[in-house]
Image: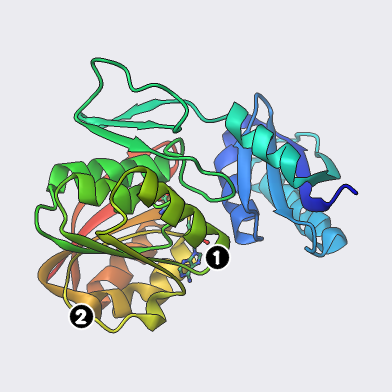
Amino acid sequence: MKRLTYFKVSVVVLPEIFDALNNFLFEKGAKGTVEEERTIVAYFDHQVNQDELIQSVSAYLHDLRSVFEKDFDIDISCEEIQDQDWAEEWKKNVKPILIGYNILVKPSWERTPDKSPRIVIEIDPEMAFGSGEHCTTTMLLQFIEEIEPVDMHVLDIGTGTGILAICAIKCGAFRVDACDIDPVASLTAQKNCKKNRVDSSVYIFSGSINSIKSQNYDLICANINRQLIVQMLPRMSVLLKENGTCLLSGILNTEKDKIVNTCKKAGLFVNDIKHDKEWLAFETRKE
Ligand code: SAH
């Protein structure tokens, strides 16, 4: 008997609203998204309230129409698919990517090229976010590479595939604690850590920042979204050592001031900001 597992939603839109819609779909609980030429395909657990989801995506697109002042068509289609289809679907879309100066992110089945960069990270994303393709991830990978976290104790909040945690260890960190509220992501992160032989240095658990007791991190990374970052910043600051660094991503251009102000209130000084398309990533320091 075939088991239906995922609810697939395809939305045909203008490329300039891809990022905003992608962010929205993750906020609505998408387990993964794939960007095709003019379409975003998002995968949800099949138990999601399908009618409510479609209505909210449609309402959001109508709002975007007025924000962008463009009269684009709204074309949403959906279907239920089986988990074996998903397994094949994500494999089609992951390719080796060069990031920063020294990082190659690749799926496990691709050969490592002879002249590959110094840091090779093998990621099989399966159902988790963090293939290395999205700029919210790549900007944090670049920050980690620049910081060179040698002997640092790192916290990775919302680890997804584990990509940032693995990168931190390969750049010299001695230990990473990594959490994700999605148990499926935690499991994927564990598998990826094993593939990269860093599992003895990365401690992964299902949960949020609230379960963390240690207050001694040299470096904290969080690629989540503006709302959650604003909520978590005071706690992140408490968990950081003096002069520790906190890297934030998942923030839109329009949200810059809000983040800068919240950092200030939490005692974090904004040291550097990277931007790519409409996304920003922050490097902050505990004062
Ligand atoms: N760190 C990866 C994945 C980022 S996606 C990267 O940079 O590519 C964001 C992840 O945060 C998702 O896996 C999601 O499940 C997780 N998440 C969302 N809310 C969270 C919370 N409150 N606490 C911990 N993880 C959370």
Q: Quadrant of the C terminus?
A: bottom left
Contact flag, marks 2 and 1 (Cβ < 8 Å):
no
In the rendering, at what x and y percent does residue 280 appear?
A: 36, 48
In the rendering, at what x and y percent does residue 186 appear?
A: 48, 61
Where 144 falls versus 268 (above or below)? above
At a point 60% along the width and 38% down the height, the residue shown is 18
Q: Which residue is mark 2?
A: 215
Q: Secondary structure at mark 1?
A: loop
Three-letter amino acid code at the position of disc 2: Gln
* Left or right position of 198 against 124: left
Find residue 152 and report its image quarter. Answer: bottom left
Disc 2 from disc 1: Cα separation = 23 Å
Observer-nearest residue: 240 or 54? 240
Is label 2 within 8 A of ligand 1 (CB to nearest ligand atom)?
Answer: no
At a point 48% along the width and 26% down the height, the residue shown is 95
Q: Residues within 10 Å of mark 1 (few under 14, many from 20)?
A: some
Q: Residues within 10 Å of mark 2 (few under 14, many from 20)?
A: few
Is label 1 within 8 A of ligand 1 (CB to nearest ligand atom)?
Answer: yes
